[in-house]
Image (spheres, rainbow, N blue to C red):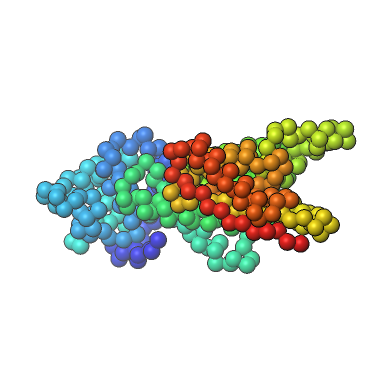
C-alpha cells in the first residue's frame, strides 16, 4: 500500500496531538489513547456512511479530493452527487462527534479537499501490521521468528470484514496476502525450534483464511504428530481432503499423503508383537486392489522389478485418466471404485493427480493388460452411463 506524504504538518502548530486508534483487522473498533475501546455496535451509522468513514480513516495521511470520493461512493447514474457528498460529510461529522464526545472538529474541509484535523494523530492496527511484515521481510536470511510472530499477533481477522465495498475488498486481499506470507515465513522457523503448539495455532488460523494452501495443513499435521496426537493429525487430513475435493475437485498432494502415512504408522505405536502380527495379517479384509500413496507405489514397483529378474515374467504399468469433460470430484470417486473392485486382490493403485491414476498388473503382459483395460472401461461406462468422462489409458511394460 503506497503511502502519501502527510500534509497535516503544514496546518498545525507544535501542540501535542491527541491519539485516536482504530482497529481495522477483524471487527471494527475505535477509541482514544488510554480509554476503553468501543466496538462496531457502538457506531450508529448506516452501511454506506460507515464505509465512507472507514475510507477516510484508511486514507488519513493525505488530503482526499471531492472527485475521488464521488467516484468511490456514487455511480455515474447518481443524481446530484455533489449534494450527496455534502450530506454524507455532514452525517460523518455528526457521527464522529458521537464517537468522540467533547472533541473539536476532527475532519476539515479545505479548498482542495478534505482531511483530518492536524490536532489528532490516527493509529491503525492495519498500518502497524503492514509495517511489521515489511520490516521482517527486509532480512530474509537473518529473520527473527519473534518479529514475525509480533506481526501475526496483530492480525485479528480479515480487513474490515463486514465491509463489502469494492475498495475494502481490494485492501482485504492485500492484508490477507501479507498475513499468509508471514505465516509461510515463520512456520519453518518454528519447526526447526520444535515449537509445536505455536505452529498448530498459526496453522489453524491461516487455514481459516485460506484452507487451500497445503503448507498449513502439512505443518499442522507434522506438529500434531510431534505432540503425539497422530489421530488428530488424521482428522485434520480428512477435513482438508474433503473440503479440497468439494471446493475445487482436487485431491491432496504427495507431501500431505506422506505425512498421512506417517500418522497412520504412529497410530500403531505401543502395540505388542502379537498385536502387530495380527494387524499385518488381518488389516486388509476387503477383497479388492491395494490403494496406496505414490511413494509406496514406487517401492512396490521396485520390489516387483527384483522379482522379475528372478522369475523372467513380465508386468505392466497403466496410467488411467478421466479426460477433460469429466466432473473431477464425482468421476474421480467413481473411477476409484471401478479400479479397486475391478482389479485383482493386491494390484497396487496410486493417485497421480485429480482424475489420474497409475496401477501395476503383476505378471501380466501388454496384450493381456489391454484386455484388463477393456474390462475396466466397459464396467465404468456400464455402471455410470450418464458420466461424461472418457477414460484414456497409457501402457508401459515394466522392465528389469
**Residue 178, position in %: x, y?**
49, 56
Which residue sits at x=21%, y=48%? 89
Which quadrant, please, contains the N terminus? bottom left
Front in this rendered view, residue 383 or 85: 383
The relative height of residue 298 versus residue 267 in the rendered view (above or below) is below
Residue pushed farthest right?
273
**Picture quadrant where residue 278 is located:** top right
Q: Is residue 6 left or right of residue 137?
A: left
Question: In the image, is residue 227 above or below residue 151?
Answer: above
Comparing 228 with 334, the one in front is 334
Q: Residue at x 33, y 40 (%)?
A: 99
> Residue at position x 66%, y 55% from top?
366
Q: Is residue 142 above or below residue 355?
A: below
Q: Quadrant of the C terminus?
A: bottom right
- For the residue pair 18 and 334, the one nearer the viewer reads as 334
**Which residue is at the front of the view, 177 or 235?**
235
- The answer to whether residue 143 is seen in the rendering is yes
Count numbered badges in the picture.
Answer: 0
58 with respect to 69 (left or right): right
Which residue is pictured at 42% across the width and 41% down the height?
Answer: 27
x%, y% of residue 289?
Answer: 68, 41
Q: Position of residue 48 (x, y in %)?
A: 26, 43
Q: Position of residue 372 (x, y in %)?
A: 62, 46
Residue 354 appears anywhere in the view: no
Amino acid at each position: 500500500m503506497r503511502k502519501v506524504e502527510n500534509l497535516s504538518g503544514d496546518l498545525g502548530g507544535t501542540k501535542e496531538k491527541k491519539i485516536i486508534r482504530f482497529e481495522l483487522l477483524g471487527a471494527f473498533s475505535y477509541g482514544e489513547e488510554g480509554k476503553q475501546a468501543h466496538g462496531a455496535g457502538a457506531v450508529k451509522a448506516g452501511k454506506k456512511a460507515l464505509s465512507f468513514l472507514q475510507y477516510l480513516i484508511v486514507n488519513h495521511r493525505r488530503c482526499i479530493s471531492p472527485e475521488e470520493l464521488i467516484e468511490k461512493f456514487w455511480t455515474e447514474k447518481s443524481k446530484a452527487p455533489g449534494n450527496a457528498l455534502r450530506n454524507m460529510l455532514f452525517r460523518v461529522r455528526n457521527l464522529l462527534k458521537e464517537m468522540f464526545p467533547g472533541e473539536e472538529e476532527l475532519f476539515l474541509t479545505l479548498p482542495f479537499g478534505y482531511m483530518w484535523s492536524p490536532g489528532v494523530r490516527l493509529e491503525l492496527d492495519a498500518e502497524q501490521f503492514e509495517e511489521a511484515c515489511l520490516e521482517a521481510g527486509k532480512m530474509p536470511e537473518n529473520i527473527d521468528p519473534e518479529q514475525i510472530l509480533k506481526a501475526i499477533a496483530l492480525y485479528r481477522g480479515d480487513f474490515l470484514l463486514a465491509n463489502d465495498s469494492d475498495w475494502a475488498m481490494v485492501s482485504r486481499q492485500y492484508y490477507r496476502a501479507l498475513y499468509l506470507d508471514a505465516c509461510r515465513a515463520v512456520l519453518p522457523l518454528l519447526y526447526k525450534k520444535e515449537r509445536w503448539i505455536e505452529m498448530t495455532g498459526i496453522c489453524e488460523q491461516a487455514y481459516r483464511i485460506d484452507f487451500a494452501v497445503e503448507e498449513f495443513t502439512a505443518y499442522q499435521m507434522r506438529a500434531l504428530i510431534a505432540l503425539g496426537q497422530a489421530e488428530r493429525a488424521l482428522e485434520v487430513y480428512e477435513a482438508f481432503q474433503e473440503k479440497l475435493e468439494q471446493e475445487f475437485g482436487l485431491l491432496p498432494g504427495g507431501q500431505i499423503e506422506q505425512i498421512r502415512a506417517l500418522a497412520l504408522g504412529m497410530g500403531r505405536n505401543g502395540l505388542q508383537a502379537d498385536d502387530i502380527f495380527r494387524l499385518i495379517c488381518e488389516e486388509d479384509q476387503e477383497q479388492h486392489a491395494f490403494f496406496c500413496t505414490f511413494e509406496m507405489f514406487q517401492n512396490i514397483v521396485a520390489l516387483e522389478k527384483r522379482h522379475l529378474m528372478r522369475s523372467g515374467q513380465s508386468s505392466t504399468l497403466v496410467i488411467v485418466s478421466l479426460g477433460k469433460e469429466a466432473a473431477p470430484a464425482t468421476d474421480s470417486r467413481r473411477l476409484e471404485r471401478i479400479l479397486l473392485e475391478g482389479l485383482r486382490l493386491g494390484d497396487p493403485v496410486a493417485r497421480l493427480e485429480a482424475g489420474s491414476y497409475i496401477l501395476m498388473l503383476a505378471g501380466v503382459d501388454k496384450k493381456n493388460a489391454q484386455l484388463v483395460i477393456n474390462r475396466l472401461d466397459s464396467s465404468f461406462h456400464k455402471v455410470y452411463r450418464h458420466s461424461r468422462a472418457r477414460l484414456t489409458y497409457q501402457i508401459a511394460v515394466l522392465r528389469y
